[in-house]
Image (cartoon, coloured by chain):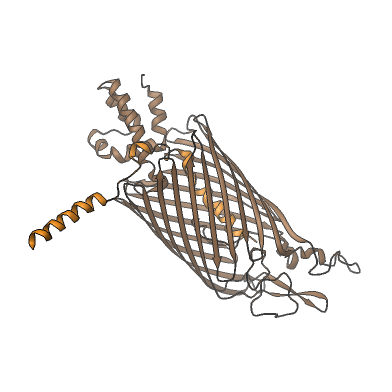
Amino acid sequence: MRTPAALILSLSLCGCSHLQPQPWVKAYERGHLADPVMQLERSAVAGKYISHVYEAREAARGADGSAGGGCGCN
Amino acid sequence: MAVTREMLNDLGSDPLVRQIFRKTTRAFKKTRGFTSVPEYFFNIERAGKLAVYRIAKYLIATVFCTSLATIVNAAILPEESADLLFHAYDGGGVTVTGPSVLVRKNFKDTASVHANYYTDMVSSASIDVLTAGSKYSEQRTEYSTGVDYLNDTTIYSLGYTNSSENDYVANTVNFGVAQEFFGDLTTVTMGYSVGDDTVKLNGDESDPIQFEANQKHHRFSLGLSQVITKNWLAVANIESVIDDGYLNNPYRSVRYLDDGKVSYQTERYPQTRNSDAIALRSIYYLPYRASVKGEVKFFQDSWGVDATTYELKYVHPWTRSWIFEAKVRSYSQSQADFYADIYPYKNFQTFLARDKELSQFSSTNFGLGVTYKLPKPPLAFLNNCTLNFYWDGFQFNYDNFRNALLSKTPEEGKDAPYKPGEEPLYHFNANVIRLYFSAGY
C-alpha cells in the first residue's frame, strides 16, 4: 500500500513541477514591451492631472488611479 | 564596431539602462566602486573592446526586458526624477491654472520617497455660478507625499494627501501592494484609501463660515497587468468607492417653477453614494516602432448614473529625440435618478440636484502630445531630460441641462428670450494644456 501511495505522490509532485506556468515571453523577447512608446502613462504628474480633469467634469470616477482630493472645479 | 564614450554616456543617461544597471550591478558596484554606467563599461573595456561590445549588447537586451518593471511589474522602484508641470484648463467660463512639482528620491534600491506640490488657481464664471451667484476666484493647494518599499517581488506603498481651499479641506491616506508573478509577466495590485473632507459654506465678513459639514470616502482598488505576447500588454482595473456624509455642493441650487416664474432652492443629495468602475486597457506594439492603445471603462453608481468611456491612442517616435501621440476619447453618462433641469414646484421630491455633472451628457476629447528629449542636460548632475507638451480639446453636449441664463429677465420691463424649461440645451468647449519638464538624476 505504501508503494503505490509513494508512487502517486511522487508522480503528483513531478506533475506539479511540470504544471507550473513558465514565462512564455522570455526576458530577451521583451524589448518592444520596454520601449517608451509602450508606456500606458508616460508621466505620473501629467497623468494625475488629466485624471483630475476627468473626475471634475464627469460623474464617473475610479479605475484609473487616484485623482487627489478637493474640488475647485465648478 | 567601436564603442565610444559618447555612446556609453548616451546609454548611461537612458533611464532603462540606469534601472538595470542599478539592479543587476549593485553588488558589483560595491566591490569595484564604480559610480556610473560609462565608468562601469570603460572599466570592462580594459579587458578588451570586443568584450565591452558584447556585454553592452547583452545589457541593452536585458535592460529592455527588466525595465519592463516600470510598466507592468513591481520588481523595480520608479526612477528618480523631478517633474515640473504647468497646467491650464479653460472652458465654460472657468479658468484653472497652476504649477505642480513632483520629486522622487530612491534609497538603496529598496525605498522610494516622493513628494508633490500642486496648485489650482480658479477663476469661475461658469453657468452654475452665473445662474444663481456671481463670479469668484479661489486657490486650491495640494501637498502629497508617499513612500514605496520594495521587498523581493513586492512593493508596499503608503501615501498621504492634503488639499485645502478656503471652503474645502480634504485629507487622504492610501495604502497599496503590488506583487508580480509568473516570471514578471503578471502583476497584481491592491489599494485602499480613506479620505476625510470638510465642506464649508462661506458667508460675508460678519459671518465668515455659515455652514460646515463632513464627508468620508473609502476607495478599494484591484488591478491586474498581464504580458500577453512580446508585443501586447493588457491591464484590468476595478475600483469601488463609498462616500458618506454631506455630499452636496452647498453653493449650488436647483430651480423650480413658482407661478410661471423661476425660483431656487438648495440642492439636497443622499448621504451615501457607492460606485463601481471597471477599466480594461491594452497596448500593442505595431510592426514598426509605434504603439496603439485602447481603453474601455464602465461605471455605475447607487445614484443611477451609468457611464461608458472609450479611448484610442497612437504613439509614434521620430528619431531618438521625439515622441508624438494623438488620442481620441469618448465619454457618455446617464443622469442621476433625482436630477432634473427644472422641478415643477418647491420640494418636489426628497432629493434634488441640478449639477450638470449629474445630468445626461456626452463628451468628446481629442488630444495631441509631443515629447522632446534634450540632447544634453542643462545641469551636469541631471540626465534623461525631456520637455513635454500636451493639448486636449473637449466638447461637452448636455441632453437635459438647459442654458438657464437665456430665461433670465435681461432688464426690468424686458422679456427673456426663452421661457423657463424651454431654453436651448447647454454645451461648451474646453481646452486643457499640460507643459512639463522632466529630469532624472
Judging depth in this view, the residue of B152 and B120 nearest the camera is B152
The reply to whether residue B168 is visible in this rendering is: yes
* Chain B tint as drawn: brown
Residue found 42% across the figure and 46% down from its top: B71
Q: Position of residue B52 (x, y in %)?
A: 30, 25
Residue B355, percent from left and from top: 66, 67
Residue A25, x across and y down, in percent: 35, 42
**Most extreme residue toward the left, as rendered?**
A2
How many tags in the picture? 0
Seen in the picture, residue B173 relative to B84 is either above or below; the reply is below
User: In the image, what residue occupies the spot 73% across and 75% down?
Assistant: B343
For residue B398, side relative to residue B277 (left or right): right
Q: Position of residue B153 (x, y in %)?
A: 31, 50
Residues B210 and B295: in front is: B295
The answer to whether residue B415 is above or below residue B143 is below
Does B157 sit left or right of B206 as displayed?
A: left
Quadrant that contains the N terminus of chain B:
top left
B160 or B360, which lies in front? B360
The residue most toward the right is: B413
Which quadrant of the figure has residue A29?
A: top left
Colour representing chain A: orange
Q: Identify the image quadrant of residue B327.
A: top right
Note whether residue B79 is visible: no
Q: Taking B67 as reference, is B198 left or right?
A: right
Q: Quadrant of the C terminus of chain B?
A: top left
Q: Is residue A3 left or right of residue A14?
A: left
